[in-house]
C-alpha cells in the first residue's frame, strides 16, 4: 500500500490522493511509483484521522505533496492542516492551483490561517502553452483559475511561490518570473523529474 506520510529532509509530506485535474507531459507518475524510496501509489485514499494518527508520532512541519493534487481532498487537507498548526507546525501546500474550479468556490479563503505557504505550478507564461504542457481537464481556462487562486492566496496572507519546470525556454522563464512579481509571489524554477 502506498504511503500516506513520507519524510524527506526532516519534513513530513502528506500523500492524500493519486487523482489530479492535469495530465502533465512531465508528470513523475509516468515513470515512477514514488519518490525518495517511498511508494506513493495508493490503494485507497486516507482519511484525515489516519494521517493525523501518523503525525502524532512525529510532530514536524508538513507539506501536502504526493502523487496527485492534494486540494481534491480539501476537507481532509484542512483538518490535517489545523492539527499541524495546533502543535506549531509550518504547513505548505504544493498544488496545481485548480482548487477553486474543482470545488466551485473560493478555497484560498478557507486556507487562511492554516496554510502558511503555497507552491503553485505556473508552468508556463500563457494559457495556450500552459494547456499544451499540463493538459488540464479544464483546458485553457485552467490557467486563469490557477492565477486567480494564486492571487487569492497572496491576498489571504499565504506566502506564494509560483514555479515552472526547467523544460521551458529562458524567455518563457523570464515572462513567468514577471507574472510572479506582479502578483506579489516568489518564483522558482524546478527540475523536471523525468
Image: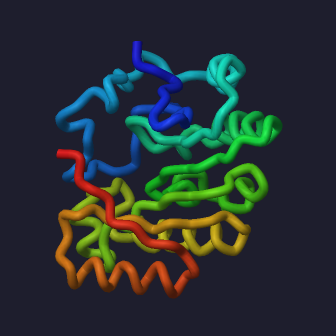
Residue at the right extreme?
Answer: 86
Q: Quadrant of the C terminus?
A: top left
Residue at the top extreme?
Answer: 1
Measuring from the top left, give residue 160's x and y in whole percent: 56, 66
Instruction: Look at the image and name its color scheme.
Output: rainbow
Q: Quadrant of the N terminus?
A: top left
Taking depth in this image into account, of 35 and 130 the one nearest to the observer is: 35
- Residue depicted at 54% across the width and 41% down the height: 64
Taking depth in this image into account, of 61 and 133 the one nearest to the observer is: 61
Reply above or below: 127 against 136: below
Picture mark count: 0
Name which quarter of the figure residue 156 lies in: bottom right
- Residue depicted at 20% across the width and 52% down the height: 25
Q: Is residue 161 left or right of residue 163?
A: right
Q: Is residue 52 left or right of residue 5?
A: right
Reply above or below: 62 against 140: above
Taking depth in this image into account, of 94 and 37 the one nearest to the observer is: 37
- Residue depicted at 64% across the width and 72% down the height: 154
Measuring from the top left, give residue 103's x and y in whole percent: 59, 51
Name which quarter of the figure residue 159 lies in: bottom right
- Residue depicted at 44% across the width and 56% down the height: 96
Measuring from the top left, give residue 125's x and y in whole percent: 32, 78
Taking depth in this image into account, of 119 and 111 the one nearest to the observer is: 119
Measuring from the top left, give residue 166's x and y in whole percent: 23, 64
Name which quarter of the figure residue 53 lies in: top right
Amino acid at each position: 500500500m502506498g504511503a500516506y506520510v513520507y519524510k524527506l529532509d526532516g519534513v513530513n509530506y502528506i500523500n492524500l490522493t493519486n487523482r489530479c485535474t492535469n495530465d502533465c507531459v512531465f508528470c513523475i507518475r509516468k515513470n515512477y511509483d514514488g519518490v525518495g524510496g517511498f511508494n506513493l501509489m495508493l490503494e485507497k485514499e486516507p482519511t484525515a484521522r489516519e494521517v493525523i494518527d501518523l503525525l502524532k508520532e512525529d510532530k514536524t512541519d508538513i507539506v501536502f505533496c504526493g502523487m496527485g493534487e492534494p486540494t481534491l481532498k480539501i476537507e481532509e487537507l484542512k483538518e490535517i492542516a489545523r492539527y499541524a498548526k495546533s502543535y506549531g507546525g509550518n504547513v505548505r501546500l504544493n498544488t496545481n492551483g485548480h482548487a477553486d474550479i474543482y470545488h466551485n468556490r473560493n478555497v484560498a479563503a478557507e486556507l487562511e490561517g492554516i496554510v502558511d505557504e503555497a507552491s503553485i505550478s505556473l508552468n508556463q507564461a500563457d494559457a495556450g502553452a500552459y494547456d499544451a504542457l499540463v493538459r488540464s481537464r479544464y483546458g485553457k481556462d485552467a490557467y486563469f483559475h490557477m492565477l486567480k487562486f494564486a492571487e487569492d492566496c497572496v491576498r489571504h496572507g499565504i506566502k506564494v511561490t509560483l514555479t515552472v519546470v526547467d523544460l521551458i525556454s529562458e524567455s518563457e522563464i523570464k515572462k513567468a518570473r514577471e507574472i510572479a512579481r506582479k502578483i506579489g509571489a516568489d518564483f522558482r524554477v524546478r527540475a523536471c523529474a523525468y
